[in-house]
Amino acid sequence: MGRTAAILIARLIFAGVFAMAATFKFAGMADTAAYIAAAGFPVSLLLAWLAAIFEVTLVLAFLSGAFFSEAALLAAAYVIFLALSFHGPSRWQANQAEFGFFVDHFTFFAGLLYAAVHGPGDVLAIRRGLVGRVAETRV
């Protein structure tokens, strides 16, 4: 019972973090695009929309359990990309809080990797996915 509750809470936390991120992007797409452009990326408005849609897709995967391991791996790569692109070493001298943001991304990364390996659990999970099928057939 405790294991099931922990897994469901973790899935809700993952979904909640990405849902908040997507909500902020949709609520202020121009601001998100400006932030992306300030980091040096071209076509920032397109990237902002793609990021928001990607985050919604992650939310659906974390809530449903469908393609959970794949979503967790993609989310882990996305989180490391965000850490390096928006909170990396080039930003630490101007604002030391950026170092904290950078490190926080790595703890989230670790949790996503752990989730990718262990899957969505057995309760309230649509058991579909490429990685999940491989893990389920292992004895």
Image (tube, rainbow, N blue to C red):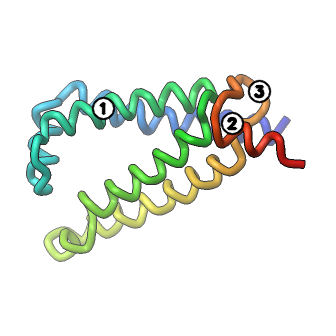
- The percent coordinates of residue 83 (x first, y second) are 33, 60
On the rendered structure, is 23 left or right of 42? right
From this view, report whether residue 134 is shown above or below residue 54. below
Q: Residue at x 61, y 27 (%)?
A: 66
Q: CA distance from mark 2 to mark 1?
A: 23 Å
- The percent coordinates of residue 96 (x first, y second) are 24, 71
User: Pointer 2: what residue?
Assistant: 120
- The percent coordinates of residue 23 (x first, y second) are 31, 27
User: Pointer 3: what residue?
Assistant: 123
Q: Residues within 10 Å of mark 3 (few under 14, many from 20)?
A: few
Q: Nearer the viewer, residue 35 or 41?
A: 41
Q: Quadrant of residue 132?
A: top right
Q: Nearer the viewer, residue 55 or 108?
A: 55
Could you say whether the residue bearing mark 1 is in a helix, strand or loop?
helix
- The percent coordinates of residue 75 (x first, y second) are 46, 45
User: Pointer 1: what residue?
Assistant: 52
Could you say whether the residue bearing mark 2 is in a helix, strand or loop?
loop
Point out the tag, 2 or 1, that comes first from the N-terminus. 1
Q: Quadrant of the N terminus?
A: top right
Point out the tag, 1 or 3, that comes first from the N-terminus. 1
